[in-house]
Image (cartoon, rainbow, N blue to C red):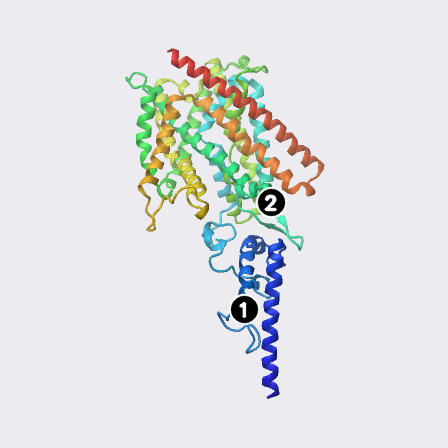
């Protein structure tokens, strides 16, 4: 009898203790405090979920066990509202319906079973981003910048490499044990952290807008370069550059039906290899004319009006910061990220500098916006057809990324969505969602028709979004999030990059816009 009485008293005491702990934990969660766990990274990831769970715990008198008892026989299990605060040998599990499960395998804190990539594979992805088709406009930058343009190619490589590293540093923080853990998973998350607590979503919206502008402008550039290359490859045909752009867009219209990039990704390696082959062919032709190189044309003076456009062109050719957080999060050895960034940007700097200089020395003042237009007719047609094929196959990548950003920002945020979802319950794309995608393809066509100037558009995009995403925001975020841990020279570098990047961005944007207005007036007069 005494034993039974003690058992009942023990059960009642345990229940009261658990409910008291749940109330205290819920109160502290609402006040913004986070209790210690065995895995601090999980604690950071589920801060919002804890507040919701503890508020549920306050409304519950008795919670039944969902599995086997955790302690002595007859003892009540831990209250659900306090499940993340229970100490034990195992790591706490996320509750059903939590953000981890919503993020799926692609989430930073969720998909630990997702296959990781090596440093070489990560370097290949970065190389694809910064060694793409847009290097074809670099000789045009040397035309207006001379040796200073070459220096800018090196300087931009150094700065973009540095800002890529400090952007990744903003993903990490020290926990209560002094360990550095990854608490953020994207560029948007970093931006939101910088604007919290007053404007917790403002930074992410700014980054999303900049990202959409850059992706859509990249699509426009692919249409522009396709029309330009085909027009200059077959000048005898009665087909204008605008007509070639319309034909290219007709080929690209099926991109509106894309649900994933499995089919397109099969061609990515082939496109990259083809691009390297084309670069080698151009350089080989230039080397065959080495006797006629115009070294005297490369000077130290700059064209004040057009050189800022060159800055935008060079910066745009190095943009890769948008996907670096995701890339680093999927590396087998994240500690190798810095080394990977070093050798990829050194290689890009050397190859871009040599390509731009050799091409400019060959054609000097006759250098055109797209350097392949300077090749002889027979070679130009073959090279340009390959380039057009590469441009058309590259178009779906930024297009699909832009569509995803738009859908997640405007159509897939539950009660926060501005418009209803683009997909039905069965996963099929709705008719009006397909119409919006087609409208985006048509928009890129209209821009390519009315602004068919590759170098000017590239300079405008690089000055507007490239400088912001590569120079301004990373340095600003680094100062904002890690101010107390930065050394004086790191603060100096960040401030200098922000000031120089801001000046170059404003100057390049203004001059690129002036160049576009002048070109538009000239076309209107013709």
Mark 2 surroundings within 10 Å by alpha-carbon count, few (fewer than 14), some (14 through 19), many (20 or more): few
Residue 351 visible from this viewpoint: no
Residue 21 in the image: state x and y as whole percent: 61, 65
Residue farthest bottom in this picture: 1
User: Residue 197 shows which numbered tag?
Assistant: 2
Horizontal and vertical percent for residue 430?
32, 43
Looking at the image, residue 231 sits to the left or right of residue 173; the answer is left
Secondary structure of the residue carrying tag 2 is loop
Residue 99 or residue 356, whichever sits in front: 99
Tell me what residue is drawn at x 56 percent, y 37 percent.
Answer: 343
Q: Position of residue 483 (x, y in %)?
A: 67, 40
In the image, taking residue 458 as reference, residue 181 lies left or right, namely: right
Position of residue 404 in the picture relative to residue 326 (left or right): left
> Foreground residue, 231 or 512?
512
Tell me the residue that label 1 is attached to. 61
Which numbered mark, 2 or 1, is in the foreground of this view?
1
In the image: residue 47, left or right of residue 448 = right
Q: Nearer the viewer, residue 354 or 501?
A: 501
Residue 304 falls in which quadrant of the image? top right
Q: Secondary structure at mark 1?
A: loop
Between discs 2 and 1, the one toward the N terminus = 1
Q: Are marks 2 and 1 in contact (CB under 8 Å)?
A: no
Placement of the C terminus among the 4 image quadrants = top left
Residue 246: percent from left, percent from top: 32, 26
Query: Is residue 69 positioned above or below 31 on the image?
Result: below
> In this view, which residue lies farthest toward the right?
488
């Amino acid at each position: 009898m005494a034993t039974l009485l003690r058992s009942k008293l023990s059960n009642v005491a345990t229940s009261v203790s658990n409910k008291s702990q749940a109330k205290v934990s819920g109160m502290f969660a609402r006040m913004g405090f986070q209790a210690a766990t065995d895995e601090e990274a999980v604690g950071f990831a589920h801060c919002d979920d804890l507040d919701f769970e503890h508020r549920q715990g306050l409304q519950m008198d008795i919670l039944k066990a969902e599995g086997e008892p955790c302690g002595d026989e007859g003892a009540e299990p831990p209250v659900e509202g306090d499940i993340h605060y229970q100490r034990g040998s195992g790591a706490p599990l996320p509750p059903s319906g939590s953000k981890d499960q919503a993020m799926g395998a692609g989430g930073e804190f969720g998909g630990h079973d997702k296959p990781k990539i090596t440093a070489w594979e990560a370097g290949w992805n970065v190389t694809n981003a910064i060694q793409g088709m847009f290097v074809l406009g670099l000789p045009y930058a040397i035309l207006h910048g001379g040796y200073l343009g070459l220096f800018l190619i090196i300087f931009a490589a150094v700065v973009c490499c540095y800002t890529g590293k400090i952007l990744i540093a903003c993903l990490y923080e020290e926990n209560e044990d002094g360990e550095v853990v990854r608490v953020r998973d994207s560029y948007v998350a970093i931006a939101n952290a910088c604007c919290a607590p007053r404007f917790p979503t403002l930074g992410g919206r700014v980054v999303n807008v900049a990202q959409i502008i850059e992706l859509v402008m990249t699509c426009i550039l692919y249409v522009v370069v396709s029309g330009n290359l085909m027009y200059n490859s077959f000048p005898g045909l009665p087909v204008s550059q605008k007509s070639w752009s319309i034909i290219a867009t007709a080929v690209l219209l099926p991109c509106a039906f894309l649900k994933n990039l499995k089919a397109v990704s099969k061609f990515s390696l082939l496109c990259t290899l083809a691009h390297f082959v084309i670069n080698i062919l151009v350089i080989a032709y230039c080397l065959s004319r080495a006797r006629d190189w115009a070294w005297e044309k490369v000077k130290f003076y700059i064209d004040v009006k057009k050189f800022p456009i060159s800055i935008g062109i060079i910066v745009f050719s190095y943009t890769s910061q948008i996907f670096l957080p995701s890339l680093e999060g999927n590396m087998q050895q994240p500690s190798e990220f810095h080394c990977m960034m070093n050798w990829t940007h050194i290689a890009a700097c050397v190859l871009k500098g040599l390509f731009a200089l050799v091409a400019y020395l060959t054609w000097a003042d006759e250098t055109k916006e797209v350097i392949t237009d300077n090749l002889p007719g027979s070679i130009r047609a073959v090279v340009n057809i390959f380039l057009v094929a590469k441009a058309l196959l590259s178009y779906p990548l930024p297009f699909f990324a832009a569509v995803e950003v738009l859908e997640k920002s405007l159509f897939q945020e539950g009660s926060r969505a501005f418009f209803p979802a683009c997909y039905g319950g069965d996963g099929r794309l709705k008719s009006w969602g397909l119409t919006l995608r087609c409208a985006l393809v048509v928009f890129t066509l209209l821009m390519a028709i009315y602004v068919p100037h590759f170098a000017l558009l590239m300079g405008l995009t690089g000055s507007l979004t490239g400088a912001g995403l590569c120079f301004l925001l990373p340095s600003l975020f680094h100062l904002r999030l890690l101010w107390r841990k930065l050394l004086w020279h790191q603060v100096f570098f960040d401030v200098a990059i922000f000031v120089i990047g801001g000046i170059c961005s404003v100057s390049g944007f203004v001059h690129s816009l002036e160049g576009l207005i002048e070109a538009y007036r000239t076309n209107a007069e013709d």
